Image: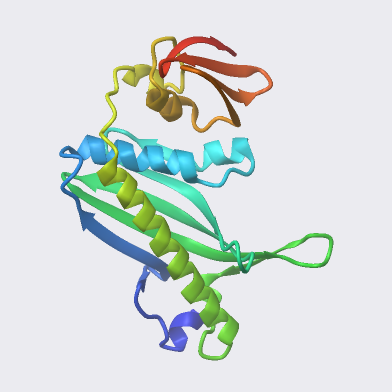
Amino acid sequence: MQLHAQGSISSPYSEVKGNVVISEFHTLDKPTSAEGIFLNALLWMIENRELENTEEDKSTFEIDYDKKQYLLEFTQTNSQSASRYRCLFSVKVTDNIITILASNITYEAETNVIKLMKRLAFEKLQPEKKPKHKEYLNEFAKLHKETVKRMLEAITTNPAPTITHWTEIKNKEVVKGMSKQECLLAFGKPASVQKQGNKEEWMYDSYTYVFFENEIITSLIK
């Protein structure tokens, strides 16, 4: 492994079974239950992750409500440099402790040749020989730190959602009477939202619409 051969791996990075990762844990006072912490972490991710191909995203977002953990392919982009990084982002909650792991980290950039994508796994970086590689390490660490900070703020600030439609959520179904949070957990983030007073229309695609009144589903088209 070239990165490790140079002896240059350093905080916040570590090595796990030959993979370069960032691993951390945080003890939270709010919400007061493991379920509340997990659901707030999951809802934040659903609302904030970058969507690309919908079908692909569904296949790479694995949620285990019983074990209170999730894993997804997560993309982060630096708006100033246009650099993009992809990783497997996993969260697990036990009691009031949340563990966060970023693994399979890859730098991505479009080339000038027919918009081909250049990909570089962090295990292949040589920061001691190539200053640009060191920039990639520092840039991703900064982006990841900011992502975790925003997620933790949302977890501790937002009240834990009340869930009454567990069966439908686990079956990825949406029914009348669901709350917005339950709809997000079941269907994910909508493609567009239209608001009019206390009413909202969520469009997922040209065939799927969900209608809310006072934040509760009143009707749907699918």
Q: Quadrant of the C terminus?
A: top right
Q: Is residue 110 left or right of residue 24?
A: right
Q: Residue furthest right?
A: 114
Colour pattern of the rendering: rainbow
- Above or below residue 96? Residue 136 is below
Q: Position of residue 59 (x, y in %)?
A: 53, 38
- Above or below residue 126? Residue 179 is above
For the image, the number of numbered tags is: 0
Q: Give residue 204's quadrant in the image.
A: top right
Q: Please name the residue shown 25% across and 41% down the image.
A: 37
Q: Please name the residue shown 48% across and 81% down the image.
A: 3
Q: Please name the residue shown 24% across and 36% down the image.
A: 36
Q: Is residue 160 left or right of residue 219?
A: left
Q: Position of residue 214 (x, y in %)?
A: 41, 15
Q: Position of residue 62 (x, y in %)?
A: 43, 39
Q: Nearer the viewer, residue 131 or 151?
A: 151
- Above or below residue 41? Residue 66 is above
Q: Position of residue 49 (x, y in %)?
A: 50, 46
Q: Nearer the viewer, residue 136 or 125?
A: 136
Q: Please name the residue shown 48% across and 44% down the image.
A: 48
- Above or below residue 115? Residue 198 is above
